[in-house]
Each structure stands twice: as structure tokens, then as C-alpha cells.
Image (cartoon, grey):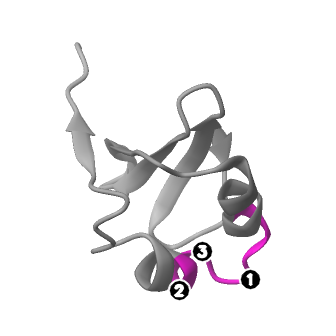
Amino acid sequence: MIPVESSQFHSIGHDPATNTLAIRFKGKGGPGGLYHYPNFTAEQFSAFQAAESKGKFFGQSIRGNKKHPHSKITEKE
């Protein structure tokens, strides 16, 4: 996971072996929930990383896109 400067996201990551995008949202006072988005290519991840506004990119290209249905990852404490 790579920390990013964003009002919405704490960090993002990508697994090219499975084409899975990982996004950790910001929570109150620190990292929040972790979500995985399948069918996300390395090229798309590069574009996401380079986006001037990651929130805008997320809203236009990822959120609500049936190609990238999200799943919340339950983490052990």
C-alpha cells in the first residue's frame, strides 16, 4: 500500500497478479476501511496514481462501475 495525498484515501495499492485494486479510506483520526476492486489493470492503477484528483478519478472511473464491484476486507485486530 502506498500512502497518498487525498482527502478521501489513506493509501492505495495494486496486485498485478490478480488485477486487484486496494483502497484504504481515511477514518476518524487515522486509517479507515480497506476495500478491494477486481478487474483493475496496472495501466488503470498508474492512471489512478497520477490523477491530479484521486477522488474525482475514483468517482468517475471506479465507484459504481460494474466492472469493479467492491468488497470490504474484514481485518483481524
> Quick one: label 2, few (<14), some, or many (20+) residues within 10 Å?
few
Residue located 75% across and 57% down the image: 43
Task: Answer whether residue 52 is magenta in the image.
Answer: yes
Is residue 64 placed above or below 75 in the rendered structure? below
Assign a secondary structure to mark 3.
helix
Query: Which residue is nearer to you in this view: 48 or 27?
Result: 48
Residue located 54% across and 52% down the image: 40
Q: What residue type is labelled 3?
A: Lys
* Quarter of the figure that contains the N terminus: top right
* Residue topped by disc 3: 54
* Residue topped by disc 2: 56
- Quarter of image, res 4: bottom right
Q: Do the residues labelled 1 and 2 touch (CB within 8 Å)?
A: yes
Q: Which amino acid does label 2 sit on?
A: Lys
Residue located 50% across and 73% down the image: 7
- Quarter of image, res 45: bottom right
* Residue topped by disc 1: 52
| Horizontal relation, residue 22 to residue 14: left or right | left
> Quick one: label 3, few (<14), some, or many (20+) residues within 10 Å?
some
Q: Gap between marks 2 and 3, in whole Å?
A: 5 Å
Q: Where is residue 42 in the image (x, y as percent from the top left)?
A: 71, 48
Q: Do the residues labelled 2 and 3 touch (CB within 8 Å)?
A: yes
Q: Position of residue 61 (x, y in %)?
A: 49, 77
Query: Magenta residues, as a range?
Result: 49-57
Q: Gap between marks 3 and 1, in whole Å?
A: 6 Å
Query: Which residue is nearer to you in this view: 70 or 24?
Result: 70
Q: Position of residue 21 (x, y in %)?
A: 51, 45
Magenta span: helix, strand or loop, mainly?
A: helix
> Quick one: label 1, few (<14), some, or many (20+) residues within 10 Å?
few
* Quarter of the figure that contains the C terminus: top left
